[in-house]
Amino acid sequence: MDATLKTVIGGELVELPATIAGIRSALDEDRAAAFDREIRHLSTVELPVALTRWALSLTTADQEDEELFDRLQRGEDIGALPAGAARPEMA
């Protein structure tokens, strides 16, 4: 069994492919070609971030992020804390 990444999207646990082959096989033909063009030229430092971005592109994570940023732009309080702020559950 290929390795997987686990994350939460829309409140649901999601497993994503975590190998180059697994991610590539989940993409349609056009996106697989773009994946091939990008991945072969990345440095080893850039590879983990790019693979995670491609794996997440198989989900609705981008849409969820956009909706969150729209709410922030409208000035909604989304319960976010400033970086470095003490979290109540960790106090």
Image: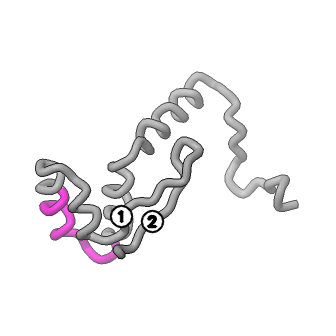
Quarter of the image containing the C terminus?
bottom right
Quadrant position of residue 34: bottom left
Q: Of 47 and 59, which appears nearest the observer?
A: 59
Q: Earlier in the sequence, mark 2 or mark 1?
A: 2
User: Three-letter amino acid code at disc 2?
Assistant: Leu
Q: Of 76 and 58, which appears nearest the observer?
A: 58
Element under label 1? Answer: strand
Q: Residue furthest right?
A: 91
Across and down, in percent, residue 54 comes to 31, 56
Element under label 2? Answer: strand
Identify the residue at horizontal 38%, vertical 64% (top origin): 49
Q: Residue furthest top?
A: 74
Identify the residue at horizontal 72%, vertical 57% (top origin): 84
Residue 1 lies, with reference to residue 52, above or below; the image says below
Across and down, in percent, residue 16 comes to 40, 60
Across and down, in percent, residue 51 comes to 32, 64
| Marks 2 and 1 in Cβ contact (< 8 Å) | yes
Read off the residue under disc 1: 17
83 left or right, relative to 44: right
38 left or right, relative to 52: left
Quarter of the image containing the N terminus?
bottom left
**What colour scheme does the image use?**
one colour
Residue 61: assigned label: none
Residue 14 lies, with reference to residue 60, above or below; the image says below
Read off the residue under disc 2: 5
Number of other residues with Cα within 10 Å of mark 2, as a class: few under 14, some 14 to 19, many 20 or more: few
Across and down, in percent, residue 61 comes to 44, 44
Q: Which residues are magenta?
A: 35-45
35 left or right, relative to 4: left
Report the number of numbered marks.
2
Q: Magenta stretch: residue 14 in it? A: no
Identify the residue at horizontal 37%, vertical 68% (top origin): 18
